[in-house]
Image: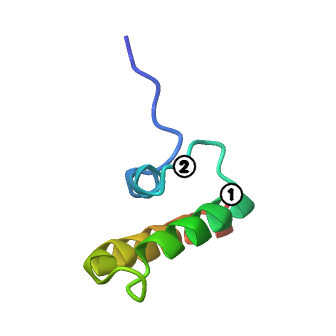
Amino acid sequence: YNPPRPKYPSKVTNAMAFMQLEPPLTLETVKKKYKALAKKYHPDISKKEATLFQKLSDCYQTLIEFLGSK
């Protein structure tokens, strides 16, 4: 038995997990979720969340690049 291969690269699935996104990915859903999480994690709002904001930015960039390459 061969388990089904993941549809997305692991870097993309990790970014999706952090941003709490489910397939199918669309540019619109990624942007919408990013805006919501950016408000939550922005350093101006919560200084202790600055590292999470950086991770969010990295994940967003990963997903945007992935969607752009399709």
In the current view of this chain or complex, which residue is farthest to the right?
Answer: 28
Establish if 24 lies above or below 12: above
Q: In the rendered structure, are the residues bearing label 1 and label 2 in contact, judged by CB atoms less than 8 Å apart?
A: yes
Q: Quadrant of the N terminus?
A: top left
Tell me the kind of residue under disc 2: Leu
Per the rendering, the mark at residue 29 is: 1
In the rendered image, is residue 70 in sight?
yes
Label 2 SS:
loop
* Residue nearer the viewer, 51 or 4: 51
In the current view of this chain or complex, which residue is farthest to the front?
Answer: 45
Q: Quadrant of the C terminus?
A: bottom right
Instruction: Provide residue 37's location: percent of width, then percent of height.
Output: 51, 66
Q: Pick whichever of labels 1 and 2 is earlier in the sequence.
A: 2
Identify the residue under disc 2: 21
Instruction: Provide residue 23's location: percent of width, then percent of height.
Output: 61, 42
Q: Which residue occupies 42% across, 89% down? A: 44
- Horizontal relation, residue 32 to residue 20: left or right: right
Label 1 SS:
helix
State the image quarter where residue 56 is shown.
bottom left
- Tell me the CA gap for discs 1 and 2: 8 Å
- Horizontal relation, residue 24 to residue 1: left or right: right
In the current view of this chain or complex, which residue is farthest to the bottom?
Answer: 44
In the current view of this chain or complex, which residue is farthest to the top?
Answer: 1
- Horizontal relation, residue 29 to residue 49: left or right: right
Instruction: Provide residue 42's location: percent of width, then percent of height.
Output: 43, 81
Tell me the kind of residue under disc 1: Thr
Dot 2: few (<14), some (14–19), or many (≥20) neighbours within 10 Å? some
* Residue nearer the viewer, 62 or 44: 44
Q: Which residue occupies 45% across, 76% down? A: 57
In the rendered image, is residue 69 in sight?
no
